[in-house]
Image (cartoon, rainbow, N blue to C red):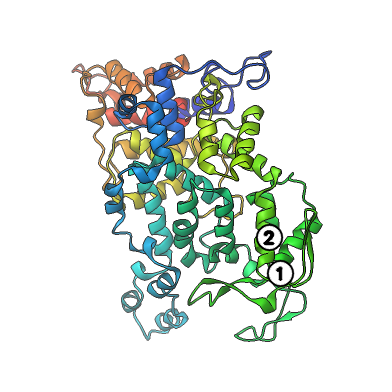
Amino acid sequence: MTWLALVLLTLGALTGCGAPAFGAGAAPPTGAAPADALRVAPPLAEARRILHVLNRVGFGPRPGDVERVRAVGLEAWIDRQLHPETIDDRATERALAELASIRLSIPEALREYPRPDPGLREKVQNGEMTRAEMMETYPPEKRPFRIAAELQAAKTLRAVESERQLQEVMVDFWFNHFNVFAEKGDVRWYVAAYERDVIRPNALGRFPDLVRASARHPAMLFYLDNWLSARPGFTVPVGPNKGRKAGLNENYARELMELHTLGVDGGYTQTDVTEVARAFTGWSIDRPQVEGRFVFRPRMHDTGEKVVLGHRIPAGGGQDDGERVLEILTHHPATARFIATKLVRRFVADTPPPALVARVAATYLKTEGDIRAMLRAIFSSPEFYGEDAYRAKVKKPFEFVASAVRALGATVDAQAAFGLARASAEIGEPLYQAQPPTGYPDRAEAWVTSGALLARMNFALALASGRYPRVTVDPGALVAGADPRSPDAVLDRLLAVLVAGQTSAETRAVLAAQLTNPEITRLSPDDRGPANTDVAKLAALVLGSPEFQRR
């Protein structure tokens, strides 16, 4: 089957050429006023509002979800999502039980998944040990890569199966905001605890608590090298590096201001970066390869006076110097504006409406960074429910994978989630492996290329065809009531189920053109028997459409 026509259509729609009509996520027509300048876009009708919320607040609807939300009421459903502790999610937790590493403390992870003995490879090479003996001594399931692999599977399983959809969206959002790279040194042993103990419990809490927790965690301290940052002239007193000179490292200080709080245009200077770095000297890790715990080392700390953004921090403050910096940064108006902008970008549009950003920033300052309050401000705003916002966002690869599995009504267990996590990597987003501290981007241009779209469509075909082990897909259930001998009827049913029947004329025409394809109708050119529509392949085409690529 050729995907070329659909790839070109989708690429054009997602980059603005041949995009859906204004009000379905496209730019306004030439001469129209910007969405936030003179008016607020017309509100969505009820069914579209529910679909919109399911695609933004969660990872997309499963069959029947629109009806379930309508039954409880949209506002009530959102309120429950804002309080995930009220939602019974024991089924998901049971499914996660076999992923043992995600529950381990850092010392336990270091012990249970030890570093390889460098002598093993040498013994295999010189014939002292067979490869089979090495595998028995150091089996794959006990190697450190297993920690990230199980964390990837857990993230995927939760996105697909959890009833606490908003919590999973926010865990993904904040992990990218406070990104650490799981493949950097000792971070591979720290990353599961970092998400579990820093990101997840604070995802709907207070932003200052989230910043403070990330600042003290070994994963962040190691990733941005702050654990080695010391006052000028400090000499390492013990250990393998005894006698080595250590100095100031500005990596964490710079990213703390540029990416975590104030934003790149937040009004700080290079002098502020240096002063913040001085304040965090001595914030380190106790025995990184044995304990991996936060420790403050007074002898590494610069005890002098510091001035950060005009605030004087007296000499002799010790660990409190860093705590004072966090207080200054998290209460700064630039931080409120920066966090509001990122949240509105995630939930409304790649170009955040300025008036909504201002209101969310005001909520931040009023509530001292209450994330739940900021989300309420977004979810109750006319901008969030405007036609301009509907399908205005392009799904990241991970969002696409999770939403496709959910749309097909597939069931997933922990073992199946490994394959789906690999699929996310294959189409561009290997989980926990964004190397830069920016994490994965939340704008369309980062994800829209012809090669990336082709990879998405190949995934959709493999998924709908049941090629992912332990991912149970029943395409026939999606088209119940449609005559399989009528490809048109099957297509209409799939469009209704997978994209709520809302496609452009161009998309419908491209999909309809495939109905004469022998691979879809299972006919040879001279076959005169009745058509027998290949529902899986047709479903994959719908999943590849521009309408499904958007949320």
Picture disc at residue 324? 2
327, above or below 374, in the image? below
Q: Are marks 2 and 1 in contact (CB under 8 Å)?
A: yes
- In which quarter of the view is residue 501 placed? top left
Q: How far from the left and from the top, in percent, is residue 451?
A: 51, 38
423, above or below 2, in the image? below
Query: Regarding mark 1 in the picture, which secondary structure is present there?
Result: loop
Query: The disc labelled 1 sits on which kind of residue?
Result: Gly
Q: Earlier in the sequence, mark 2 or mark 1?
A: 1
Q: How many marks?
A: 2
Q: How far from the left and from the top, in percent, is residue 524?
A: 26, 23
Q: How far from the left and from the top, in percent, is residue 531?
A: 22, 19
Q: Nearer the viewer, residue 186 or 66?
A: 66
Q: Disc 1 marks which residue?
A: 317
- In which quarter of the view is residue 312 placed? bottom right
Q: Residue at x 44, y 29 (%)?
A: 53
Query: Regarding mark 2 in the picture, which secondary structure is present there?
Result: helix
Q: Is residue 222 visible?
A: yes
Left/right of residue 115 with respect to residue 464 in the rendered view: right
Q: Residue at x 62, y 40 (%)?
A: 366
